[in-house]
Image (cartoon, grey):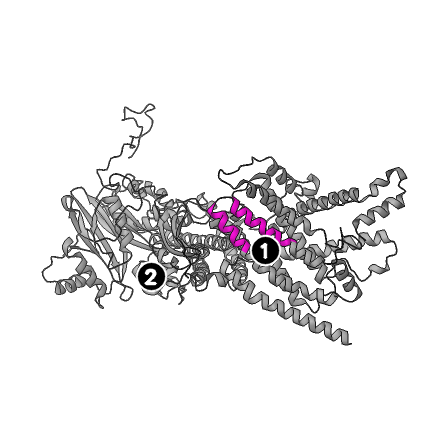
Amino acid sequence: MTLKTEEFYINMGPQHPSMHGVLRLLVKLDGEYIVDCEPVIGYLHRSIEKMAEGKHFGQFIPVTDRLDYVTSMSANYVFVLAVERLADIVPTPRGDYIRVLMVELNRIASHLLWFGTNTLELGATTPFLYAFQEREKILDMFEATCGQRLTYNYLRLGGVAYDLPKTVSFAWTDGVMPFEKACEKFLNEMIPVLDMCEELVSENAIFLKRTRGVGVLPRDLAVDAGCSGPVIRACGVKYDVRKAVPYSIYSELDFDIPTRENGDSWDRYKIRMDEIRESTKICHQVLAKMPKGAFKQVLPNRIWVPPGEVYSRIENSRGDMGTYLVADGSEKSYRCKFRTPSFSNLCVMPYLLKGALVADLIAIGASLDFVLPEIDR
Amino acid sequence: MTRSEILKALGDKFPGVEIKEDDTNPEALIVPADNLVELASHLKDDPALSFKYNMVITAADWVEHVDVIYYFMSYEHGHTVALKVQLPNERMKVHTLAGVWRSANWFEREVYDLFGVIFEGHPDLRRIMMPADWDGHPLRKGYQHPNFVPLPGKDNPASKTGMGHHTI
Amino acid sequence: MGIADRIRNLFDSAGLPPALDWVKSDIVMMLVVLVLVIGFISVSVLFLIWLERKVSARIQRRMGPMLAGIPWLNAKSMWLGGIFQTAADAIKLLIKEDLTPAEVDKLVYFLAPMLVFTASLMSYVVIPFGDGLSVTDLNVGVVYLLAVSSIAVLAIMMAGWGSNSKYSLLGGLRSVAQMISYEIPMIFALLGPVLMAGSLSMQDIVKAQAASHWFIIPNIIGFIVFIIAGTAETNRPPFDLPEGESELVAGFVTEYSGMKFAMFFLAEFSNLFVVSAVATTLFLGGWAFPGLDAIADPAIRTLVSFLVFLVKTYVIILLLMWIRWTFPRLRVDQLMHFGWKTLLPFAFLNLLIAAIWVMVSVRM
């Protein structure tokens, strides 16, 4: 006699403690197993791309902050890179180096936030606080540099908005220190804390049970669905925009691209932890080689860009972020489209969730590391 | 491969199809809408081209026509190319690429939602950003909405303060 | 000898006038003991909640409650700050609006929190707090304890069903499945010390340990099994999927607010104390302590035994708290696999070891 079961829908609605923003998941369950899942997005759609058509380029940079507020420097960067390519603006050397330092620090901050929320959603509340303590130090440094902790509005056409501060004094620096020394101090002190967090989490039997073999993404599907970043590097595709199409000074820097084979949640987790270490390497090199000079090209507030189209790509914390910019000769963009990695990473979620348990949904969603502002724009 | 080499490869395989290099976009090739699927499938399947990664599908509104642009990249060879399709207002339809690349599914839904381009054969063509019952396609240039209000400014009689200037 | 008898002795030695002899009657003694036990539980739970918050805060490199306490104590020491925080929270919960969702099954919904606290309260009857300090010394104490803890399972099922909500029902069912699955390894783990003491009475087990050695020595596996099963029984992390996992909001307590929610919360901490107390009694020697017999004065001896018991129980409590804040949680199916396929065989192994030990020690 077969048991008569009924499939029912659960709505993991836009308001949800662990949905990384306002994502709605319509999940069709058969008991504890997920039969199908449909992500519904658009709850955070702020028509950023339409706004681009009404603001001139300099005015639009603060709006790009809100495009991905966790890695706001990268969001600024992708737009600024596109405009610079169209208008043939070359950033100053010091500006270039400062940009890379800020972007990499932001990458570390974003991965720390991801790490904290990932373990928090799996139930381990303690690593969340350790990660956030380190992230606070990065935010302190950002606050000293550009006055903001989250949405920086720091990059400008031709460089950055302000120079690095000469000296800083935080609770975690002993007294007043030059900014570069404070940054080095932070990087050196963060690695042991990261080691401690990894020791707590990476080989923990319960964590392994929750993430090993969970959410396995086949390589062909990942490539076909346009996934990028740690998601695709976990499947064995060793691709990083910083190495493949080097922009800024990345061709002069020495760093690795962590790659893994299995494509499950644990691999994605480990890659991001390794990426934090690679970013610290980059930051050390940048601080050692930082040139002196102007931090920004002297440019007028509004610039008129010759007509043309460009597609600029950078490596965001979440993957391959791009800007398709169409300029028509005016001071505003004619069409500005942001290609965001979370959008493509999210569209494999229904595939990953088939046959998984509801508790896995949280683990898989956390390991994909998507943020809704990027998806909805 | 450079853009002209890709153009040559496509031209050799599909002799009757008119493919042009785009002047405004250094990576794009303008192709006719009717041949898009066969050209794109060839780009993906041919081992010398091997464009397995569809990076983005988006559109730009040029008032009388809409340009839909598809960016592709190859992991093996590292080259990038874009295909651009120009759709006049009267016939904003093109066949879908969702059967060729899975990523095209959501990208095309977004272009439909915001521009109104119909992708024939798409398995699930409905709005993705805007609510399901929304009227109109917001990213078109002539889009009007009853909620739009003019900003206050000294040129605007609706403004009471007349302060400052505005740039929108 | 129980608490009631000790109080009667106290009255006798203090010189009670004959007119007040009714004070020593059974009914009055019952009420007095009831008030004492409930008082102990209340203070204990209030203290435990504050302790949990402090321990978790220090593990997470932060401070925990610091303001709601005695001002000079707050300022003097981070560890002792904010001791009245729980009282403030309890008062807040008491004065909250008592929302009842529309379509609940009224009897079941209202009865569930009371039942869960009652089940917890009933366990305190057999716990040996000290030398001659148990409410009553049932000669089937261990069995009684296990039976009473099963009432909590019923109460949780009632809460999940009565709330008339998909999420509560799912949470309730999962919780029930988990608790039933982990009761069995718990029972078998407890059988080791019972075998070695030769009695089911809690006070007898303690006296047996006082006579020889703490029963943790041959039963170390059983101790670990009991600690794990105890954590699962009280629905604490890493086994708190039924109530903690984000998609279920709060599991079976989703629809409860105000005092009813407080009841579930208090019952959880009360159960924590019970589990630790049972672990102490059966594995760590209870109130027994090597130098205890040397103390001549019975009143002092009782007091010292009580303190020893408290210290040992709090060691176990701190261990359980430490485990809570370190590990992520197990998924439901992994939880069930672990309980049935890993823990139960180890519990059997422990029983075997204890049996062999008893056999060998009888021979010698």
Per the image, label 2 sits on a secondary structure element best described as: helix
Q: Residue at x 62, y 54 (%)?
A: C150
Say which mark, if any, is on residue B44.
none
Q: Is residue A45 left or right of residue C274?
A: left
Above-or-below relation of B31 to C76: below
Measure the alpha-carbon separation of dots 1 and 2. Answer: 37 Å
Which amino acid type is marked by label 1? Answer: Arg
For the residue carrying disc 2, how many other residues have a C-alpha within 10 Å: few (<14), some (14-19), or many (20+)?
many
Query: Which portion, as a residue range, is magenta?
Result: C148-176
Q: Residue A159: give x, y in percent of width and height.
A: 36, 49
- Which residue was labeled with disc 1? C324
- Which residue was labeled with disc 2? A222
Q: Is residue C275 left or right of residue C177?
A: right
Q: Residue B105: give x, y in percent of width and height.
A: 27, 54
Q: Nearer the viewer, residue C51 or A7?
A: A7
How many marks are shown on the rendered structure?
Answer: 2
- Residue A204 visible in the snapshot: no
Quarter that holds the C terminus of chain C: bottom right
Instruction: Please report, as a chain letter, where disc 1 is located.
Output: C
Which amino acid type is marked by label 2? Answer: Ala
The quadrant in which residue C139 appears is bottom right
Residue A316 part of the magenta segment: no
Residue C170 part of the magenta segment: yes
Q: Residue at x 15, y 44 (%)?
A: B89
Are the residues at dot 1 and dot 2 in contact (C-beta closer than 8 Å)? no
Above-or-below relation of B161 to C259: above
